[in-house]
Amino acid sequence: MIYDLELIKVGKVYDNGTTAVADFDLMVRKGEFIAFLGPSGCGKTTTLRMIAGFESISRGDMMIRGVRVNDTPPERRPTAMIFQNYALFPHMTVRRNVGYGLEVKGMAKRERDEKVARMLATLDLEDIADKRPDRLSGGQRQRIALARGLVTEPDILLLDEPLGALDANLRKAIQNELKLLQRNLGVTFVFVTHAQSEALALSDRIVVMNKGRVEQISPPHQLYTRPNTPFVANFIGRNTIVDGVVRAVNGEVASVETALGLLSGALNGTLAPGANARVVIPAEAIEVVADGPGQAAAVGARSDGNVVTATVQRSDVVGHISHLSVTLPGGRPLALEAHVDKYPPGAFLPRNPVLLAWQAAEATVIPAA
Ligand code: ADP
């Protein structure tokens, strides 16, 4: 199989000695929507710029459609890049902005006009084609930038924080547009973001990066439900992470001795009894039950023995969401929320004991480091 994009042990060391990216491995299929997600400085932009050819590659190999492009200049790569600030020419009309790349390439006017007209129609920009971008809204400017990138018919469209310049309401609307557009065109998209919600909403797979290294590459749902590393468990979703020592491994389930008792979860990675491990429990997986006589045994029986007694601190209802703050044994706080139907107002009173329970399959056991 020929991939649209392959990064094989790609690394980047800047001239000042900074290692920005190390050992980056990634295979991208045609038409995939890939996000690079991670905190500021983790190497997302550097990697995107190496794919575009704006940064040289210090180590490893980069292939596009099976061809090694390490030494290919940006204009000869089948890529286009959308910059965060869009970098539109303010004095040119929308039409001319969109056609500029083709003009520079020396494409004949007739062919160029046809391609531009088609792209303006695809992105619903016909009505404003003869306006100047500085008179237009953020959402419209974003679409012009997309049109300008896509009109060159790249194999891979690279997007640097594509929604970063938009306000929150517009972001949501443009997210949907972007996803639909990408599906319809079938072009491979690789985008950089530090916004988890954006990556989760748009991507087929997310590459989580930390300090220049890839932590995990997975579909969004899997990052949530099966984090591979402590960094991912902390960074994605709302997880409670409990340290302990593996006591037993039974098929796909590991039991871990922790300060909260013996807890179990789906084993992710290779861990033998005696190894240091972390149990990662997603907030969404936790069932809360008021404590009472015989309750712990009853709840434990249906939650693979994963029951922890906690103490209610506060319980508030905001709109149709109940917020519950509890304290775990040892004093650690935990915030939970659910629809009011699940935690009705008054069900959990401050200072009362509650039982927190979850199925083993919904928690994940990972190596401690
Ligand atoms: P991100 O996009 O995830 O915020 P970057 O790729 O911009 O991260 O940066 C990764 C690391 O490389 C950071 O430590 C940053 O300071 C460093 N860096 C980025 N550009 C340069 C440069 N031109 N010269 C030296 N170091 C750089």
Image: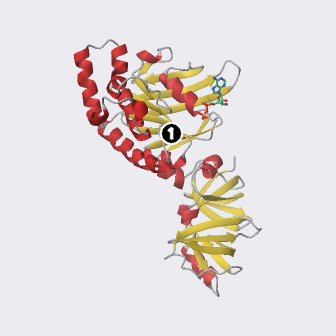
Residue sitting at 38 percent across and 29 percent down? 132
Location of residue 150 in the rendering, given as x and y in whole percent from the top left corner: 35, 29
Total numbered labels placed on residues in the image: 1
Q: Nearer the viewer, residue 229 or 206?
A: 206
Location of residue 205 in the rendering, given as x and y in whole percent from the top left corner: 46, 42
Asked which quadrant contains residue 255, the reply is bottom right
- Whether residue 87 is situated above or below residue 366 in the rendered picture: above
- Name which residue type carries label 1: Ala
- Whether residue 282 is situated above or below residue 353 in the rendered picture: above
Which colour scheme appears in the figure?
Answer: secondary structure
> Does the image show residue 155?
no
Q: Residue furthest bottom?
A: 293
Asked if residue 266 lies left or right of residue 256, the reply is: left
Q: Nearer the viewer, residue 210 or 166?
A: 166
Label 1 sits on residue: 165
Asked if residue 9 lies left or right of residue 353, the reply is: left
SS under mark 1: loop
Asked if residue 363 lies left or right of residue 77, the reply is: right
- Whether residue 171 is situated above or below residue 5 in the rendered picture: below
Location of residue 103 in the rendering, given as x and y in whole percent from the top left corner: 34, 16
Location of residue 201 in the rendering, given as x and y in whole percent from the top left corner: 45, 49
Q: Residue furthest right?
A: 330
